[in-house]
Image (tube, grey):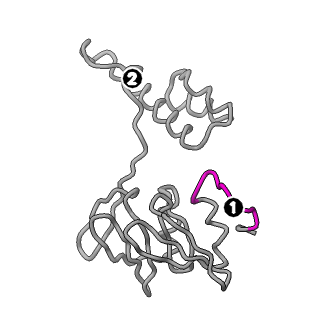
């Protein structure tokens, strides 16, 4: 059963925007189409009771995927914009989340944080560090085969040889860089 058919069955109606999935669109596009299908179903259910002046599903813009994440620290849960996290540092059984507004200690492994924050642009550069690709300003090669990475705000991190292949995610286009950098 194709994804097109599955979403038609969930919505209970034919949804023309789902044709994009057949063309190999991304998971994000699939999510957007799924949200559109649910919107269509909600519109069908409430059509009879809806006043004429309210917008229909076709007029309502698609909802974007959330970028806020909840971070539990002691007895509080703080909600932060994941795109504003500059780095995550492992510290024993905790991780230090460096956010634009504050630094927060969270009892979580660096591996679990890497999986959760990957969709928001954070990449692993060391067994103890994740950095947000949007915050990286400079990379320097070191004699040891490792790299030094500087992010906005002046913090420097070492990119270990094991994770140097993840540096290719820092830019879409590389100018003046030989392909041996990531070999």
Residue 156 is labelled as none
According to the image, label 2 marks what residue?
A: 57
154 sits left or right of 15 in the view: left
How many labels sit on residues? 2
In the rendered image, which quarter is residue 91 located in? bottom left
61 sits left or right of 165 in the view: left
Please state the horizontal and vertical placement of residue 147, each as a whole percent of the image: 60, 76
Disc 2 residue crowd, few under 14, some 14–19, many 20+, Cα 10 Å: some
**Pointers 1 and 2 in contact (C-beta within 8 Å):** no
Q: Is residue 174 above or below residue 23?
A: below
Asked which secondary structure carries label 1, the reply is loop
Q: Residue at x 39, y 51 (%)?
A: 67
Please state the horizontal and vertical placement of residue 174, each as a whole percent of the image: 65, 55
Q: Is residue 21 above or below residue 43?
A: below
According to the image, label 1 marks what residue?
A: 177
Q: CA distance from mark 1 to mark 2?
A: 48 Å
Q: Is residue 166 above or below residue 175?
A: below
Q: Is residue 1 above or below residue 148?
A: above
- Magenta span includes 23: no
Task: Please report the bounds of the magenta region as a residue range.
Answer: 170-180
In the rendered image, which quarter is residue 127 located in? bottom right
Characterize the magenta stretch by its predominant secondary structure.
loop
| Residue placed most toward the observer, 107 or 37 | 107
| Residue placed most toward the observer, 71 or 135 | 135
| Residue placed most toward the observer, 122 or 44 | 122
Q: List the single residue furthest toward the front.
A: 176
Please state the horizontal and vertical placement of residue 94, each as a whole percent of the image: 40, 81
Q: Quadrant of the N terminus?
A: top right
Q: Residue at x 39, y 58 (%)?
A: 82
In the rendered image, which quarter is residue 179 located in? bottom right
Q: Residue at x 52, y 40 (%)?
A: 31
């Amino acid at each position: 059963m194709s994804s097109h058919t599955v979403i038609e069955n969930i919505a209970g109606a034919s949804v023309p925007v789902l044709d994009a999935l057949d063309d190999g669109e991304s998971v994000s596009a699939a999510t957007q189409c799924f949200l559109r299908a649910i919107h269509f179903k909600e519109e069908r259910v409430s059509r009879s009771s809806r006043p004429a002046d309210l917008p229909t599903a076709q007029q309502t813009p698609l909802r974007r995927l959330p970028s806020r994440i909840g971070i539990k620290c002691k007895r509080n849960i703080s909600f932060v914009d994941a795109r504003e996290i500059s780095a995550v540092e492992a510290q024993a059984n905790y991780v230090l989340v460096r956010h634009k507004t504050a630094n927060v200690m969270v009892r979580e492994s660096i591996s679990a944080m890497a999986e959760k924050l990957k969709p928001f642009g954070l990449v692993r550069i060391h067994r103890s560090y994740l950095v947000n690709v949007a915050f990286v300003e400079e990379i320097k090669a070191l004699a040891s085969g490792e790299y030094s990475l500087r992010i906005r705000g002046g913090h420097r991190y070492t990119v270990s040889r094991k994770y140097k292949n993840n540096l290719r995610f820092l830019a879409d286009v590389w100018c003046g860089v030989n392909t041996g950098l990531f070999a």
